[in-house]
Amino acid sequence: MSAVLKPKPHYIVCDGNEAAAWAVSLAQVDMVAVYPITPQSSLVEYLAKFIADGRLGAEIVDVEGEHSVLSVLQGACLAGARTYTASCGPGLAFMFEPYMRTPGMRLPMVMTIVTRDTLTPQSVWGGHQDAMSVREVGWIQIYCETLQEILDTTIMAYRIAEHHGVMLPVNVCHDGNYLSFATGRIDLPDQAEVAAFLGQRDVNWHVALDPERPMAVDPLTGGAGGPGPALFVRYRKGQCQGMQNSLAVIEEVHADWGRRFGRYHAPLVEAYRMEDAELALVTLGSMTGAAKDAVDAARAQGQKVGLAKVKTYRPFPAKKLAEILAGVAAVAVVDRSVSFGWNCGPLYQDTLAALQSSTIPAMSCIGGLAGADITVGHFARVIAACAELAQSRTPGDTLWLNEHD
Amino acid sequence: MIEIRLHGRGGQGAVLAGNILAAAMVHEGRHVVAIPSFGFERRGAPVASFLRFDDKEIRQLTNIYAPDCVLCIDPTVGRAVNIFDGVREQGIWVQCSAKPLAALSFPDSIATVGLCDAVSIALDIFRRSITNTIMLGALAKTTGYVSLEALRVAIQSSAFRDAGLKQNLAALERGYEETVVHKIERRAAA
């Protein structure tokens, strides 16, 4: 019997923006359109370099603004291309009109959001406010915790987006500053293995700009008469169904990635030390590492704490999160953004909705706005507040973690 | 886990130094995460970079508040910011300075001081006061956290080419050779 030896890992040392650029190169995209914006700029500079060096055989279009970025990519997608861009903050705001149109056209683009807090007050630093502001537009949104996860998830995003039961655009979110500029070791997968994992691109079978099969793309639909109402509902329901279908596809794609590359990332929600947990933290993105260290420290002191990290944020994995949290005495949700309508964090609202049929009390914590740090010490305070909530069972006001820093 | 905080000024390559150091440590089989501090990029302004290394995976992606080691690649930035803020007991301080130890003040928590006149070396090699690779040599000599050979490999695999590569390799060697390491006897309690 011959043994199949796994080749030695190919380690490189790079930051999160470069990790995303490597993923795009390995996914062999056909068309990239970019406009630089802090803290995304170095990501598109790496891409431009990869294309100039011939490592990535894509066309790059330097356009005059983010509105044109997505408009260019919509045309490319309709012509059958695998497409990529990255943006954040004010750039994402300027992109909004074509951003809103992309999921309805069922275009399987992948776009990184190098998350940044929104203006104003004027700031150039990380936070989830930009991505959160577009959470109901219909893009799939997946948040990364580590540098390796950026690389792996960006590649996986193409298989999720291009799945015929999904056909929706995907935002892969990585935290501005803490992931975009953090440097560490990543394992670079083999080009041929990534190509085999992704398979043939087939992105315009349903809607196309193609002289061989002329069609009207996105004609006027809806209104109150004729076939309009029913047709519009059909499109909308189809979009919702695509989102729901993606939950299983995301799990399937992560499982296949694990089988092929040996790295099993939790696809929807990661449960960390949740067996027998009485208190639970809910986290999103790069803050999770410090939260896990705080959980370990509290466990060492005899406190039964666990953590649920939401990776797939849209569609929201409500069932999975509720399963993981079932049986705890209290939950503390940590957001890196604000829901202005509810005076709490948006992930907190989602968690409450997921827990609607339980009586578990939950509280909202907000930290890490505009580049602020959420340290192990901050998470120790969250755990203490969660323990109090388990006793009082009455959630108080939102806890602002950096209020006195 | 060991935590190093790098201090410098915009334009001196403190962030690049952090990345080269990270690459060198990965070459030696360590887990490393380096995070630069986040300001507007402005030449001459104080900057910091945070590096953690360990033999196991590092999960927390945060700034460093209680460093085991302070690496300061600029002779005067210590006047603008408290480079010793939160430094641990038995701390190590690697400083770019032409002054003798007796002319420098530092807290009791510092137990080892490595001094290197990196500005003079830089003016000699680069004709500019770019001290980053010189001070990586000083760090290797003072702390033993990383070998000179691993730093050589990291510099060779970075973006430096031709004359620039040669100069930076020479800078690294001279930083290592010309650093003087002082062990500080604990001052008797008053």
Image (cartoon, grey):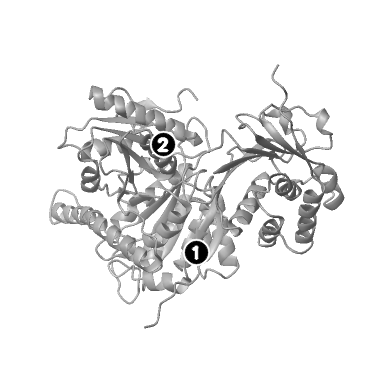
Vertical position of residue A110 compared to residue B46: above or below = below
Counting from the top left corner in percent of width and height, residue B181 is at 77, 41
Counting from the top left corner in percent of width and height, residue B98 is at 84, 37
Q: Is residue B14 left or right of residue A309?
A: right
- Say whether residue A387 is visible: yes
Q: Is residue B176 left or right of residue A234?
A: right
- Label 2 marks a residue whose chain is A
User: Which is more toward the observer, B87 or A143?
Assistant: B87
Q: Residue at x 71, y 37 (%)?
A: B112
**Mark 2 Cα shell of 10 Å, populated few (<14), some (14-19), many (≥20):** some
Q: Residue at x 45, y 24 (%)?
A: A403
Q: Residue at x 18, y 49 (%)?
A: A223
- Label 1 marks a residue whose chain is A
**Marks 2, 1 in one chain:** yes
User: Which is more toward the observer, A378 or A139?
Assistant: A378
Q: Residue at x 72, y 31 (%)?
A: B78
Mark 2, residue position: A297
Counting from the top left corner in percent of width and height, residue A149 is at 43, 55
Tag 2: amino acid: Ala
Q: Is residue A217 left or right of residue A27?
A: left
Mark 1, residue position: A188
The quarter of the image holding the N terminus of chain B is: top right
Counting from the top left corner in percent of width and height, residue A89 is at 46, 42
- Say whether residue A119 is visible: no
The quarter of the picture where residue A328 lies is: top left
Q: Please identify, in this view, whether the residue under mark 2 or under mark 1 is nearer the observer.
A: 2
Q: Earlier in the sequence, mark 2 or mark 1?
A: 1
**Mark 1 Cα shell of 10 Å, populated few (<14), some (14-19), many (≥20):** some
The quarter of the picture where residue A200 lies is: bottom left
Tag 1: amino acid: Leu
Vertical position of residue B1 compared to residue A150: above or below = above
